[in-house]
Structures are given as structure tokens and as C-alpha cells.
Image: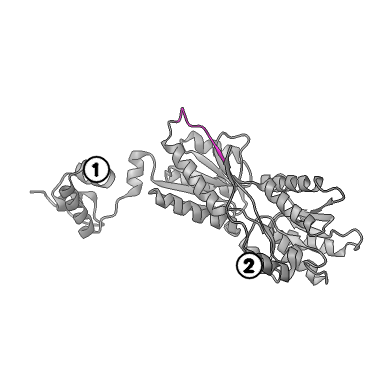
Amino acid sequence: MVDVPRRDGPPSVHHVAARAGVSLATVSNVLNHPERVADGTAARVRAAIAELGYTPNRNARALVSGSTRAIGLVVTSLRNSLFTDMVSGAQTAARDRGNTLLVASSENDLVAQGEHLAFLESTRVSGILLASMTESRDQVEAAKQHGRPIVYVNYEPTEVDACSVIVDNEQAGYVATKHLVEQGCRRIGFVSARPDLQPVARRRAGMLRAIAEHPGVELVDVDAGDIDPPGGTDAGARIAAMPAEVRPDGVLGVTDLLAMAVVTELRAAGIRVPEDIPVSGCDHNSVAWGGAVPLTSVTMHGEEMGAAAVSLLLDELTDDPAEHVHRTVILGSELVPRESTLGRVRAAEVAAAGTPSDPRRTEA
């Protein structure tokens, strides 16, 4: 006969063992290693769990094992649909492989990012996905020293040895610029800020490559001061105020939010988009799609980045550390033409024909 322990709070593993008439070790095996338990015994334990409403204490289990079946994800900002798509893809991939996802947003604040990383470590996550705009070497090295592997998302590390998943940001700048050239633009304004940020620098490099392929086309740098919409508002007002003979006849915003703010200011000044100045974005942020003129942009494949990052992290967790080789997964960038560069008639033709959606994926 099994003594039923006194119950003063939520049911515990002791109550489950008593109800099922088995040992604590058997209950533990049913929860963690069911293959070790006979089917009939396991069924009795599961029935006891259901009757009592028992929920395993994951924190206690983490203290014993040193980690949980949880993955942390810290993103730059959930106000950008690239990162919300990333969360969606990572969450689905993690769940498919029996893991949960814990998400935090730093809102472009490195101090907050460090605090989020420290908190995730304290919850004993198995590993962390970091969608940062910078390498954040000190923060990442601290986590790695504590045994938490890190996978970068939307950033390719150059100083930290780690796996990463990136979109081809140079290609994004290239295809957007080439599209503007094909629309007849010869003075293309590049509205950007923060050249220290890797995506910004790489999109500009792609723009320069496209311009170099087309003699007679020139770049006009327009410093927005910041990559948030107010910077685009200021840049758009300055472009609108330029004399027509020196004003850019096409604009590429390094982000969609910058580009959308430019469109608003140009139209307010009586400059038609796209008839007078075609405008393109570069990061396919759905937050910027609500303006009067649908915005041309470039696909970022956030969901696929999130899923690929989870796969890399779980592979690293199961690999022999001495044999693991860090990899970079690169997703391609494709143009999504809309009315801000094509006009209403042409945009309708493109929509009817469909736009490319499958990424070109390589590993380096």
C-alpha cells in the first residue's frame, strides 16, 4: 500500500506516484524517458497525472539538467515585420522539434539587449537566437562561456565564432537600385543612416555595384540621421526643397519606413510618386504598407530566417562540440514591385503575373 502524502497545495510528483502506485523514479521516467517504462505502467501514471491535474515543474527539472527544452530569441524591434515574421518562423520550427520559444525585444537598445540575454540565461534556455543590428561581442561571449550556444539572425558575425542566418542585403540594395535604373532614374538618392550597421552598409554596397554597372547613373547620399520614420520625414522634405535640376529623380530608402516617410513628404510638396520620382524601400516591412502609394520593396524572408536559425541551433546542441563547424545560411533577396515605382497600371500587371517568393538559399 502506498501512503498518499498530505496535500496543502498543487499536486506534486509524490501525489502522482502515490495515486498510480509506483515509485518516484517511475514517474520521472514516464515524464522524461517514457521508452523505459512498460506501456501499462505508463498508462497508469498518465491517468494519475490527468486526474490530479499535475503540471511538471520545469524550473526544478532545469536545475537538475542544466537546461530546458526552451530557446531564447532576442530581436531588435517587434515594430518591424521582418522580426515578427522571424518570431513566427522560429516558433513553428521550435515547436515542431519539441521546444518552446521565449521572445524579447531590445527596441534598438544594447543595454536592454544585454538584460534580455542575461534573463534568458537565468531561465536556463538551451540556446539563444540573436537578431541584432551589431555583433554585440561582449554580450555574446559571456553567454557562450556559460555554455549557451548563440546563433545570429540577420547578422553575419566577423569577430565571434558562431552560426548565423542572413538575407543577402547586398543583393537587396543591388536589385532595388537596378529596378530604379530600369525605370529611367539617373540620379538616385540613397536615404539612409547608421552606416555602422551591417545591413545598412551592405545595402549601400549593393547599390554602388548596380550604379557601377550603368555609366551615367550617379548616387546622391541623403543622410536621414536615423533609420526611424522621423529621419525619412526630414530627408523627404530636404529632397522636395532641392532645385529640380539637382534633385534625385529616384529614391531608395534603406528601410521601408524611411522610404514611406519620403513618399509622404514628396506628395505633400506636390511631387508625384512615381511619375516624378519613383521611390523604393529595401526591407519589406509591412508596417510601411499603409500609405497612399503601395511601396516597392525587397523580400527579407523573415519566417525562413527564423526557422533556419532554430535548425542551426538545435544541430549545434546535438553535435559533438569538438566536431561542430559553424555555418552561415544565406537567403536570397527578390524585388517586389509596387506602385511607388511602377504606377497603377503597371503594378496591376505585375500583381496579375505574380512576384517571386522562393528564396535562393546557399550555405557558406
Q: Amino acid at mark 1?
A: Glu
Magenta part of the protein: which range? 321-329
Q: Is residue 274 above or below residue 214?
A: below
For this view, does 343 lie left or right of residue 24?
Answer: right
Is 170 in front, or is 253?
A: 170
Is 114 in front, or is 274?
A: 274
Q: Which residue is disc 1 drawn over?
A: 35
For this view, does 11 lie left or right of residue 177?
Answer: left
Residue at position x 24%, y 46% in the image: 30
Secondary element type, mark 1: helix
Residue at position x 50%, y 56% in the image: 88
Is 57 in front, or is 319?
A: 319
Q: CA distance from mark 2 to mark 1?
A: 54 Å
Q: Amino acid at mark 2?
A: Ala
Q: Is residue 314 above or below residue 345?
A: above
Q: Which residue is disc 2 drawn over?
A: 352
Is 136 in front, or is 250?
A: 250
Q: Is residue 33 above or below residue 246?
A: above
